[in-house]
Amino acid sequence: MISVEQWYAGGQCHEVNGRDVFYQRAGQGETLICIHGFPTVSWDFADIWSGLTSRFDTIAHDMLGFGRSDKTRRDITVSLQADIIEQLAMDLGVRRAHILAHDLGDTVAQELLARQYDGSAKIEWLSCVFLNGGIFPEAHKPRRVQKLLASPIGPLFAQLINKRSYRNTMTGIFGPKYPPSDAFIEGTWALATENNGKSVFPVLIRYMQERRDNRSRWIGPLEQPKIPLKLINGVLDPISGGHMATRFRELVPNADITLLDDAGHYPHVEKPIAVIAAIEVFHQGLIAIID
């Protein structure tokens, strides 16, 4: 596994729309943009990084409010996160790309696809692979900690979160066969809390309400897709596991789903080999369609 230190030593910060954004880029081929989830960081993709970069020109960044990117406590919305991705991609010379997204990243990806759907996108999106996340708000089952962060007492509650409670929460959303490692807990906790990061949690968690407010906009591109879509789902995830995959199958035409029956909310961390294999099969299928 790539350590936290190695991950951040291998990347760099770039100013995007006046905000510092950390990103990592490696590999060759068509561009793949990886979008992480809440409350973790781009380092989530470390275990599948070599598999991705062997096939793609791969870009992964810390979204605003996360990791080593800007944590200024200004309004951070899903739309703003999408703006940052579009501008970062353009600054790096990217005009067309695939997407791999997880958790909150799924929602940001849905906003990017909605822009392509309505003709306002700055980047041409070629395909999207979703990992576990609240793609359909009616099927999303937030944990108590998420509800409290989103409540009026969110700022106070955020300061009460400690590494022990964080470990318990994360362990509860991983599959029991593949619990989070000490390195994962230590690394992601440190990155989440540095630079007064806990104070940003209640701002970031507003994405749950945004999902409800923007349901029609963000579901439309899935119900009538213009590009190939895939879901890789850790079934044992209590937040967005098998029940989310069921909803995906109900609403997405000819739904392409890989179910990982013994994985939880972080399939790319829990079962990286299986996730890379599923991504490989999906993209090989795209080549076959083009040929």
Image (cartoon, rainbow, N blue to C red):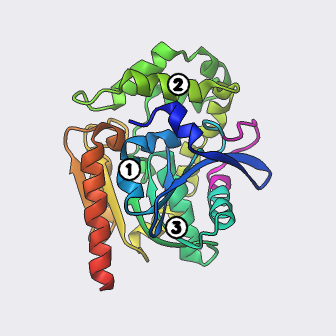
- Start and end of the magenta stretch? 69-81
Badge 2 local density, few (<14 within 10 Å), some, or many (20+)?
A: many
Quarter holding residue 45? top left
The mark total stands at: 3
* Residue bearing the label numbered 1: 50
Circle 2 — which element?
Answer: helix
Circle 1 — which element?
Answer: helix
Q: Which label's residue is closer to the chain start, 2 or 1?
A: 1
Q: Amino acid at mark 1?
A: Ser
* Residue bearing the label numbered 2: 189
Which of 27/247 is in front?
Answer: 27
Q: CA distance from mark 1 to mark 3?
A: 26 Å
Which of 273/213 is in front?
Answer: 273
| Residue 176 at least partly seen | yes
| Residue at x 65% of width, y 46% of height | 12
Q: Amino acid at mark 2?
A: Trp
Badge 1 local density, few (<14 within 10 Å), some, or many (20+)?
A: some
